[in-house]
Amino acid sequence: MATVTEPTGSTAVGTATSGRTGGWLRSSAAQALLVFVVLVAGYWVTRLMGEPSWAGGFPTGPGDRFMAWLDQVYAWIVANRNDSPLFLYFFNYISVGLGSAVVLINQALDFLTWAGVTALGLFTAWRVAGWRVALLVLATFAVFALTGLWTESMTTLALIITSVFIALLFGLPLGILAGRSEMFYRGLRPVLDFMQIMPAFAYLLPFVLLFGIGNPAAAVVTAVYALPPVVRITALAIREVPQGAIEATTSLGSTPWQMLTKVQLPMAKRTILLGVNQTIMLAVSMVVIASVIGAGGLGDAIYQALAKVNVGQAFQAGLAIVMLAIAMDRVTGAVGHGTRTPNIPERYRMPLSAAGLAVIILVTAIGRLFGLGAWPRDLSIDIATPVNIAYEWVQSVIGAYTAALATWTLNWILSPLDLLLSGSPWWLVVIAATALGWIFAGVRVAIVSAVSFLVIGLLGVWDNAMDTLSQVLVASLVTIALGVVIGVLMSRNDVLAAILRPVLDAMQTLPPFVYLIPAVALFGIGRIPALVAALIFALPPVIRLVNDGIRGVATGSVEAAVSQGSTKWQLLTKVELPMARGSLLLAVNQGIILVLSMVVMGALVGAGALGNDVVVGLAQNQLGLGLAAGLAIVCLGLFLDRVTQGRRAPRA
Amino acid sequence: MPRFLRRKGVLLRVVVAVLAMVMVSSCAVRTDQIARDPGVVRMALNGWVGYEASAEVLATILRDEMGYEVQLVRTDEQPSWQALDQGVLDVIVENWGHEDLFELYGPDGNDTVVDGGPNGNVGGIGWYVPAYMVDEYPDLPTMEGIKEHADLFRTAETGDKGEFLGGAPGFVTQDQGMINAFDLNLEIVFAGSEAAQITEVRRRYANEEPVLFYFYDPQWLQEELDFVRVEFPAYKPGCDADPEWVPCDYPQYHMNKIFRTGFVEEDGDSYQFLDNWHWTNEQQNEVARMIADEGIDASDAARIWVDENPDVWREWLPEGYENR
């Protein structure tokens, strides 16, 4: 999810002339192929030389020392968590404060009873976003109730409220500062870039280290993960306030504070609210992943279903989360657009709010009078069983074929690639990575690539990192190939596009965990189900970007090509694809980063490699190993992101 | 819009007030000062079905017969201890060993957890192979047999080594140490969770494919499928001291309960009840089989058992609850 929200300007179409693009692609593709050939040759040469020690994996000495040091730090923290001033006066404040906030909000929601919460949600949604959205909110609450997950939903809601609040508390001021000071923004931007490349799974361990297990750590990690969009978009919004308005205010002699509160913020309000919207969406996705570090609620329900390979149960909880995400998106989105808000004259607003409040209080009172609490579990509809039956049927019909496909992919593609990467001399791999960086994106990225790979080696997780890299490469190739094909088809056929769009929406909001479970039953345990889950997770944005890119090609160019008699294939390969190059590159970049974030989660179904180090680190208290693996994941992400970003213009 | 903002404002003030109260009431904050509802029992839920059976039965009784709210939080074994240490959870109902953690968090260490005594379940971990393999290779379930036939277990994932199918990464293991000490040509593949492992074992069992895996007893699947435990030199105290070199089998475990010290000191009815609780492997398996084999929802399975066995669990209730 990390980089989806980046406001890049590269979707703009027609910036590159087709002639230059073709030449550039041809030559760099050839160069990349050359790098690959050199790597294969190097692998065979060292095999034939009997794998001398100078040509093996990265020496593990420094990494082992680093991990041992981290383990010592962790042991110190465990022994001093309730003694050291650093914890007593700082970290514990945060974790106890946030943990308590989650409990208190949860209690408040419990106090309101299901009737009161529904009334509050409906009224607020109607007031800020109109009756259509209010109906959607009603449907969401109905799903919470009827899936028998009311209590879990309230916990998740409490967690999201807490962490979004914290994210905004820090994000808005940071964004305002960045909007007003160019220097501050320049300093902040690499940090935000970094945060958005970092896969969600790699966030977990450092926060466990400082804030422990459970809801407090989950709230902090969710807040941090959700922070970048609100900072970025607030800064952007403040910058976009017209210069004229600012000069006029200055000339009237207003103070900087007045300028901020009376001019800049009001004028930037709508854009800022879109940033808030993005932050909420990221928080929803992270809250699910945080169940790995003991966060309660719907994420926990999915995690438990995953542990039992119970597809139906996971689907039920997944449905509740999707509804929650859609409802929150529509409510905050409507606030941002301001279009659907009911038009109420100024003088009725206060009385109306008071009436709404009275209704909510009344409903709550009645609810409490009748001893309502959470929605009773008995009054729920069982979706899990039919889903499980359908799923078992699918498994029995195609299970044998998918298992065979899995074995074939493993034997003929994944294992050789893994062997090539981890069996080659480590310095040859570093050189290859550097060369790829140079070919695709220039000298600076070449340096970043080299440093990333060296750091991975120094962290002591070289072999597992190469394993993860091979998984990412294979999954990305399949994702991009499929994504381009489907995206092109979708751009050609409006009916198909209309059918696919809601499917893609749902696929993108569904928590990534959910994909792991059916993948296991169809493809067995191991790396393949992780690849399949990554494919499903990363496909929607790729398809969407390709489709949008091609549809965005200027009609003039298309008509010119058609009138000159080009075939459909020529039209696609010579005109549309080259002109949509910006979108295609962005699709590749997004696809690869999303694949990486999902592949490491595949450790939960036996994909091993770096993700497994994180899981083992967490489960066995080997924080050194877990943290080193987390950092290595970040390094891989940095390398993949920078190389695929290519020579695109620097971000706005 | 204004209402929306105003609600934010109220929220802000409430949170600021709460934070201020926390800061004023005590300057130094210990992790166990986190807000907690005394009517809520927070139970760790570790990832195997026997544990789940115990936890769900206890939760059902606490909820329906004693009026408590129960939170079951899914964590791995070691993080559960950590959560007890930090005051985020109250109890682990089925602990397998973990002497090192008790040293760290127990009375001689941080003094944040207390040994609650045995819960009645006795268990053993070991290496298992399916019976159909033993029919074909009678010497297989021994250390020498595994060594000789390691290549039987080769899979696409492990290449030229045999595959040893591990359970969840969080389980207690000494498998790598045993592989090293007995010089076995095996590679551990973690299934990621117990359920994933069971799914995989079942699939291979159905096709009569070879499989060598980490398993344990009491486990309901043992009664459904026919497994043979591989014999290794018996456990002697201290033989597992070096995790990289373990020349012996797993020990027998007498499972015990672990409480948060603060939870014991409060001495509420929920603690009394959990302290009294004690049951056998057979009783646990009755519930576990319903959950895992018959696919009944865990809380429903617990409900069925509770309805059928009132005379068993009435013994566990603290004074004042017997007649309700």
Image (cartoon, coloured by chain):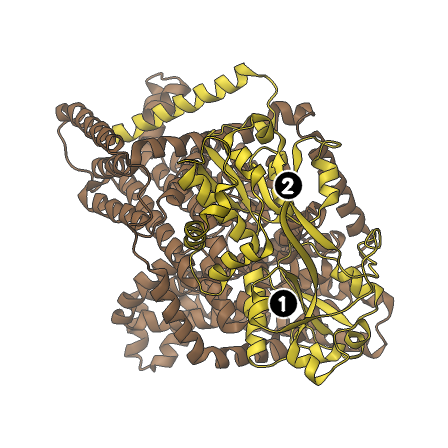
Chain colours: A brown, B yellow
Q: Which mark is residue A283?
A: none
Q: Residue B79 appears at what percent x and percent y?
A: 62, 44
Q: Is residue A309 left or right of residue A62?
A: left
Q: Identify the element where label 2 is drawn.
A: helix
**Three-letter amino acid code at the position of disc 2:** Trp
Residue with the mark numbered 1? A470
- Where is residue A297 shown, x and y percent of the image? 44, 45
Front residue (pair A441, A448): A448
- Residue B201 x/y as whole percent: 59, 71
- Image-quadrant location for residue B190: bottom right
Disc 1 marks a residue whose amino acid type is: Ser
- Name the chain under label 2: B
The percent coordinates of residue A43 (x first, y second) are: 75, 74
Residue A186 visible from this viewpoint: no
Q: Is residue A557 shown to the viewer in this render? A: yes
Q: Is residue B73 left or right of residue A416?
A: left
Where, quadrant-wise, is the N terminus of chain B in this rendering? top left
| Mark 2 → mark 1, Cα distance in angstroms | 36 Å
**Depicted B196 relative to depicted A641: above or below:** below
Of residues B282 and B89, the one nearer the viewer is B282
* Relative horizontal placement of residue A578, taking residue B219 as reference (left or right): left
Q: Nearer the viewer, residue B158 or A45?
A: B158
Quadrant of the image occupied by residue A387: bottom left
Q: Nearer the viewer, mark 2 or mark 1?
A: 2
- Residue extending farthest to the top is B24
Secondary structure of the residue carrying numbered label 1? helix
At a point 74% along the width and 81% down the height, the residue shown is B138
Quadrant assignment, res B267: top right
Q: Which residue is mark 2?
A: B81
The C terminus of chain B sits in image quarter: top left
